[in-house]
Amino acid sequence: MTTVQKRIHKSPWNVSHGNINVALRVFSQRLNNQSHFVSGCAYTIWILPDRTALPPGMNRLLQAYRAENCLVVFEYDLVLYGNEAADDLWQLQGGPENATEQFILETSTKEEASYEGTLSCMADVFKQLLLNAVDEQMTTAIQRVIAWIGDQLTIERLRGLWKYRHEDHNSFDRLDYMIPIFGWFHLVMAFANSIHKQYLGNSAAIGSLRQAFDVLKRKGLITQSTKGPFWHHLDEALHHISEAHFRASWLDVGNVENLADLKSKSPQELRDLAATLIQKHASREAVNAVEAMSPQDRDEVALKTSFPPYSSDFPVAEIRRLHREWPEDLRNYIREFCWLMSRDGGIESWLPFDIGQEQNICDIKVLLPISFLCFLTASQVNYRSMGPGATMDYMGKVSPAIPALRKVQRHMEK
C-alpha cells in the first residue's frame, strides 16, 4: 500500500472498481455463526507509463472547454456521414516501457448499488490512497484528472452523481476531476445481449438467431442469463454465425460453389471480389439499395440487421465527448490509455481495463482463501471453498498481495 500511495504522486493513474459477491462458509455453525452471502467492492489502481502524463492545468482547461462547447449543437449525422474519413489505424505502442502496472487496494464491504454507496466507495479509494485530507482534496479538485472505469451501471451512477451534485459549492464535491469511462468488455456484452434480444426470433424464421442455434445444435441460448457460461456460449455462437455469413458472401460474389474454388483466382481478382463484397453486403450503399426497393421486394431481415440494435445512448455520448467535451490532449489520452491496457507491454496482450478488473475480482475470490497453498495449479484452486479464517477483514488485508500471488502461481505452473 505504501508503494501505490507514493506512485500516484509521481505517475499518471486510473482507477476501476467493481462489485464482488462472496459466499462465506462456516464449518462449525451456531446461531450467531452462520454461512452467509457478502457483497463488497474491489478496487484497482492502474499506474500508467510516465510519458502519458497530461499537461499541467488540464483540469481547469477541461472545465473551460466543457463550458465553451456545452451550448454548441452536436450534429451526430455529420460524424457518421460526413466527408472526413477516419484514420484507418490507431496503433498502440507496446514494449515493457509502455506496460500498465496494477495495485489492488483493500477489498471493502461497501456496496456500490446506489448513489450513496458509489460515493462511499469513492471516498474509500481516496482514504486508502491517503488523498482524503483537505489539502489533497483541493489538489484533486483543481489539478488532477482521474479516469474512473467501470461497467454500465457504475458509469451511469457516476454520471448521475454529476447531475445531482452540479450545484455543490466546490470542484471536489461536484466531481469535476472525474472522467467516467465505460469498459469496452461490458459494452461488447451489452451489445451481444441486445442482438440476442432483437433477433432471437423463432425456429421457422429464416435468418433468426434461434434458427441458427438449432442448426448448430447450441443449447441454453434461448433465455438470457447474467450467471454461468451464457455469455461465453453466446459470444462463440455469434462468431460462428458471422463466419458462416462471411463464407456465404464470398460464395455469392465469387460465383463459386466451394470456397476452395477461389484458389484459382489471382490476387488482383480476390482483391476486386473483396471490394465487391464490401460494397454489396457491408456498406451504406447496400442499405440504400434495400431502402430504395418497393416494400414487397425488400429483404426485411437484411434491412433490420443493417442497423445495430443497441438501445443505449453510450455510442452517441462517447462520440459527443470526443468531439465536444474533451480537449485534444485529453482526447488522445483517453483513447490511448483509458480504453485498453497491457500488463507486460506485449503487442498481443492488450485487453480492456474492465476485463483486468474482472480478473482481479476472480483472483480475490479464488486465490485468497488458499493463499497459503499458492503453489497449487489453477485447476486445483478454482471454486475451492473458503476456509474458516477467510473473513472479509482477511480478504481486505490480503487483497493488495494478489499480483504477487498471481506471479508465484504462474511461476510454479511453469
Image: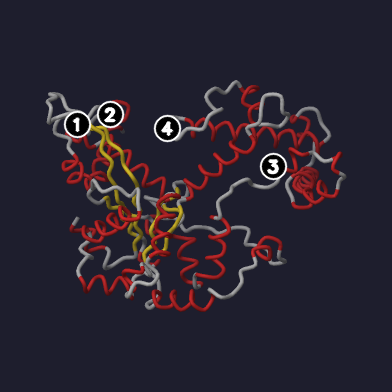
Answer whether labels 1 and 4 touch (C-beta < 8 Å).
no
Answer whether labels 2 and 3 touch (C-beta < 8 Å).
no
Q: Secondary structure at mark 4?
A: loop
Which quarter of the rendering shows the C terminus? Answer: top left
Q: Is 400 left, or right, of 98 in this rendering? A: left
Answer whether labels 1 and 2 touch (C-beta < 8 Å).
yes
Q: Nearer the viewer, mark 4 or mark 2?
A: 4
- First of labels 4, 2 by sequence position: 4
Q: Secondary structure at mark 2?
A: helix
Instruction: Out of 128 and 161, give the one closest to the viewer.
Output: 161
User: How far is mark 1 from mark 4, CA to CA?
Assistant: 28 Å
- First of labels 2, 3 by sequence position: 3
Q: Is 334 left, or right, of 391 in this rendering? A: right
Looking at the image, residue 38 lies above or below residue 276: above
Looking at the image, residue 257 lies above or below residue 105: above
Q: Which mark is residue 373?
A: 1
Q: Position of residue 408 (x, y in %)?
A: 25, 39
Going by the numbered disc 4, the residue's amino acid type is Lys
Q: Which mark is residue 381?
A: 2
Going by the numbered disc 2, the residue's amino acid type is Val
Q: Nearer the viewer, mark 2 or mark 3?
A: 3
User: How far is mark 2 from mark 3, CA to CA?
Assistant: 43 Å
Residue behind mark 4: 227
Residue behind mark 3: 305
Q: Quadrant of residue 165?
A: bottom left
Q: Nearer the viewer, mark 1 or mark 4?
A: 4
- First of labels 4, 3 by sequence position: 4
